[in-house]
Image (tube, grey):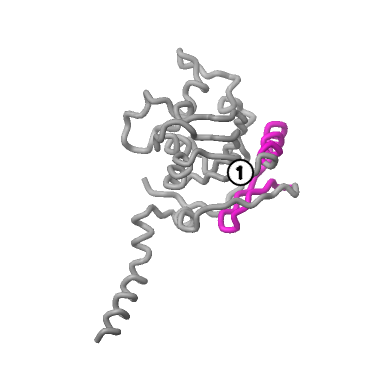
Amino acid sequence: MKHRKLTVFTSTAVPLPDENIDTDQIIPARFLKATTREGFGENLFRDWRYNPDGTPKTEFVLNNPRYSGEILVVGKNFGCGSSREHAAWALVDYGFKAVVSSFFADIFKGNALNNSLLPIVVPEAFLQKLLTMVQEHPETKITVDLPKQTVSVEGTDLIHGFDINPYKKACLINGYDDIDYLMSLAGDIAAFEKARKQKFL
């Protein structure tokens, strides 16, 4: 699957304030048989979204028509538990571009960054304001500016910066995986080798 580019995007958001959401809740283990990244979105939060007979649980936020968007706003310690990369696959396949929380499990964070999903870490106070705003006003639009490393709420002064590894930032902006990134440096590498050879002639 080709990695998508992430730069600046504006979207409504889906609020899920639960804390300590683990990867088995994000994508249950029984759905991990596939080896490609497509199709996992339909089973995202499967046991929270559906009853045993397959009917939707109307109380769950993803089944609430009031909420939609490319940004998921969640409680702290999101993505804890097992290291399955499928959790990131499921979120991306569902349509999310970013997840906002006050803390992510390290392995999930790495898996997200490797799969064109931006994990945005903000202070707890900012997160709670964001959750309240989105829950009370589903039409709230959030802008993520990856080049500037900011997340903000349109029409308000609510804005906060976030940190990201410079290498992963470059990969997300350009839609690169690790191999793509190395290939993008081919010209620089060739020029360096040429200059090095000339130096010793």
Coordinates of residue 165 in the picture (x, y in percent): 50, 54
Looking at the image, is 80 positioned above or below residue 200? Answer: above
- Quadrant of residue 127 within the rendered picture: top right
Coordinates of residue 112 in the picture (x, y in percent): 46, 43
Q: Residue at x 46, y 57 (%)?
A: 167
Q: Quadrant of the N terminus?
A: top left
Is the residue marked by circle 1 packed among few (<14), some (14-19), or many (20+) residues within 10 Å?
A: some
Q: Residue at x 35, y 61 (%)?
A: 182
The residue furthest left is 201
Q: Residue at x 60, y 37 (%)?
A: 73
Coordinates of residue 71 in the picture (x, y in percent): 57, 40
Magenta span includes 33: no
Label 1: element kind: strand
Magenta stretch? 127-155
Coordinates of residue 190 in the picture (x, y in percent): 31, 73
Looking at the image, is 102 positioned above or below residue 81? Answer: below
Looking at the image, is 179 positioned above or below residue 70? Answer: below
Horizontal side of residue 71 vs 92, given as left or right: right
Q: Quadrant of the C terminus?
A: bottom left
Identify residue type, mark 1: Ser
Q: Residue at x 49, y 15 (%)?
A: 51
Q: Which residue is mark 1?
A: 11
The residue furthest bottom is 201
Magenta span includes 153: yes
- Quadrant of residue 38 within the rendered picture: top left
